[in-house]
Amino acid sequence: MRFMMKLRNVGSSVRSSEPSGRATGTPNRTLLIASLATLATFLDTTILFVAFPDIAATFTDTSAGQLSWVLNAYTIGFAALLIPAGKLADRIGHRRVFLAGSAVFTIASMACGLAANAELLIAFRVIQAAGAAALIPSSLALVMHAFTREQLPRAVAIWGAAGAVAGALGPTLGATIVETLGWRWAFFINLPVGIYTVAAGRRHLQESSNPETKIPALLGVGLIAVAAGVVSYAVVATEIVGWRSGRTLATFGAGALIIAMLIMHQRRTSAPVLDLELFRIRNFVWANLAMLVFGTAFSAMFLGSILFLTQVWGWSILQAGFGVAVGPIVVGLVAPRVGALAGRIGQRPILLIGGALYASSGAYRLLMLGPNPDYLRDYLPSMLLGGVGVGMVFPQLSSVVAQALPPNRRGVGGAALQAGRQFGGTFGVALTVAFLSAATGLSASLIAFERIWWLIALGGLATSALALPLLTSGVTTEAAPQAARE
């Protein structure tokens, strides 16, 4: 695959330019291992959307509401544990946490595939989410440690592209696996990747950490995990009880109260989970906001695409999966190239253009998509525009934050960014379901889908707007924390 060849080439190109005094190990291997782990982790956030009907058919004695936690338990657990796991990785070692997380994720994936009932499947999904939360921030920190300042924008872009490709590839791969092998193999496909990342990681990854990082206070860890979980649950619950119900509003209120308690605690404790000092870094703040917005639009796009092709055009799940496959291909081709360009011109111009292109994909759908199928004329151009936009935005937001973070905060800072993506993804799915839940009949469905296309367009424009305050041109890894401050 060309994407994997890019992983090898970018690592090989920096061997001769490694700075003295930095334990870089083998950059190409580090990038390959970290990107594969990221690919598997984010794949599990979307692949089960197409596997869910077969899971429901297997566990017929479990209600649809209970089974929805097969999807939601992973998303909520992932978001809730990311920041504590990132802090822990900074303290005890990124390699150590990465290997542990990869082992937990792999074993839990096997257990999910073997689960005899829905309750066990949901429980194993929570454990799987804990492994994923350990993998993501530690893998980014390992990549940052392995590459030189000059090569870092491109390397982080490839790492970020793995997550973007995984999110878009989920429906395609999921449909193929479910149709041919059954839903349990949606979990079993993680096993070879997990075995490789553990075995190769033990051999090739170089440890990095900051022993002076204080182990976070348990109260802070609990507050941040509960706050993330409650807010995610509040968004997920809207799919079942609606946005205006007292239950939903009360859950959002409880989440806001816990967040306020968390902020007060983090200001006073000498061992914070998420250092509030990070929010004085300009690029960290704006990139996180952009990630939240773009994550919302992205999840609405891929779920809306699958539902439109199946519900309006009447395609099978397998046909719909291949119909959206062009998106991940474009992302994999675009991300490494714009990553190299970002090293010369900075990330802000790329983010401005990427957000606008993504918005144009939503606008194209508004103008062209209707009840009569015409894939090449009415649908394919929007997927090409959207794929280019995703390939420019997701990886470059990761790159902005990576270069803005102090070296001893790479784990927790990267975790905060990915938590924003998870929150956005959960929010996008909930909005999509809310738009479509009340639609009955073709005309009402088309209006509901138009709202989703508007969400894509506005999300892309908002991402470009949030990129305007970024300071990226000529900012190096070491200088970024100071240059990006207010």
Image (cartoon, rainbow, N blue to C red):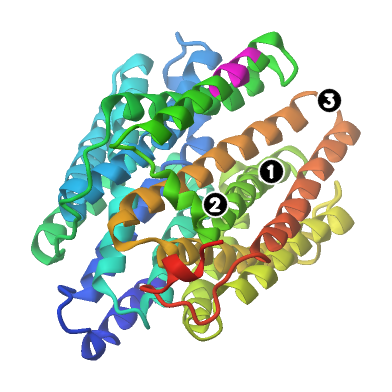
Dot placed on the residue nearer the N-terminal end, 2 or 3: 2
Helix, strand or loop at disc 3? loop
Residue 469 belongs to magenta span: no
Q: Amino acid at mark 2?
A: Asn
The residue that label 1 is drawn on is 304
The residue that label 3 is drawn on is 440
Q: Amino acid at mark 3?
A: Thr
Report the disc number at residue 416. none
Q: Determine whether label 2 and label 1 are within 8 Å by CB.
A: no
Give the Cα separation between the discs numbered 3 and 1. 16 Å
Give the Cα separation between the discs numbered 2 and 1. 24 Å
Name above or below for residue 247 compared with residue 422: above
Name above or below for residue 176 compared with residue 9: above
Q: Amino acid at mark 1?
A: Gly
The residue that label 2 is drawn on is 288
Residue 21 in percent (x, y) is at: 15, 79
**Viewer-nearest of discs 2 and 1:** 2
**Viewer-nearest of discs 2 and 3:** 2
Q: Determine whether label 3 and label 1 are within 8 Å by CB.
A: no
Magenta stretch in the rendered image: 250-255
Position of 483 compared to 369: left or right? left
Residue 252 belongs to magenta span: yes
The quadrant of the picture occupied by the N terminus is bottom left
Asked if residue 173 shows in the view, the reply is no
The number of numbered discs placed on residues in the rendered structure image is 3
Q: Residue at position x 69%, y 72% from top?
A: 353
> Looking at the rendering, which quadrant does residue 469 occupy?
bottom right
